[in-house]
Amino acid sequence: MRLAQLLDERLLDTIPQGGSGPWTPHQPLAQSPDEAAELDRQFAAMLPCRTNDPELWFAEHTAQVEEAKALCRTCPLQAGCLAGALERREPWGVWGGEVFVDGVVVARKRGRGRPRKSETVAA
């Protein structure tokens, strides 16, 4: 219950952006190093990108990309992650439940070696 209360009261409202990297809260959430380590462990357990294979978010196969997008939809930090990725113009991968290719959100990731959707684009 303590973790849920902290998330509601302080954590989710103070996150400046999502994405990977070390967690640096604006205000201390724990009183001791042991409590801080436990909160970090519990918080990381709630994030799909921290509990699943990281390669899933940078997969080449469409099925794996769709799996990563579905996992993102369960994340409490989805909106912040997406906002941070847009701001940083992430070059590729799944961020905040969206697929990025060349720093732009695309509807679906196309597999390697596939022909272009339109011949007019190739010309």
Image (cartoon, rainbow, N blue to C red):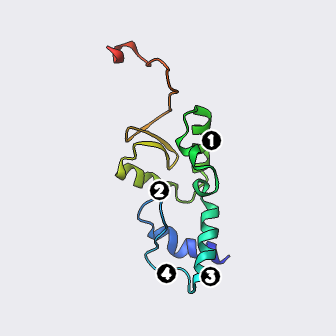
Q: CA distance from mark 3 to mark 4?
A: 13 Å
Numbered disc 3: secondary structure: helix
Residue assigned mark 3: 34
| Total residue callouts | 4
Q: Position of residue 55 (x, y in %)?
A: 57, 45
Quadrant position of the N terminus in the picture: bottom right
Is 101 above or below relative to 13?
A: above
- Callout 2 touching callout 1 (CB < 8 Å): no
Q: Position of residue 20 (x, y in %)?
A: 48, 57
Residue assigned mark 1: 67
Image position of 114 (left or right of 85): right
Sequence order check: which comes first, mark 4 or mark 1? 4
Image quadrant in which you'd find residue 67: top right
Sequence order check: which comes first, mark 3 or mark 1? 3
Q: CA distance from mark 4 to mark 1?
A: 34 Å
Within-10-Å neighbours for mark 3: few <14, some 14–19, many 20+: few
Sequence order check: which comes first, mark 3 or mark 4? 4
Residue assigned mark 2: 19
Q: CA distance from mark 2 to mark 1?
A: 18 Å
Q: CA distance from mark 4 to mark 2?
A: 20 Å
Residue assigned mark 4: 28
Q: Position of residue 107 (x, y in %)?
A: 47, 34
Numbered disc 2: secondary structure: loop
- Callout 3 touching callout 1 (CB < 8 Å): no
Depth check: 100 or 76 in front? 100
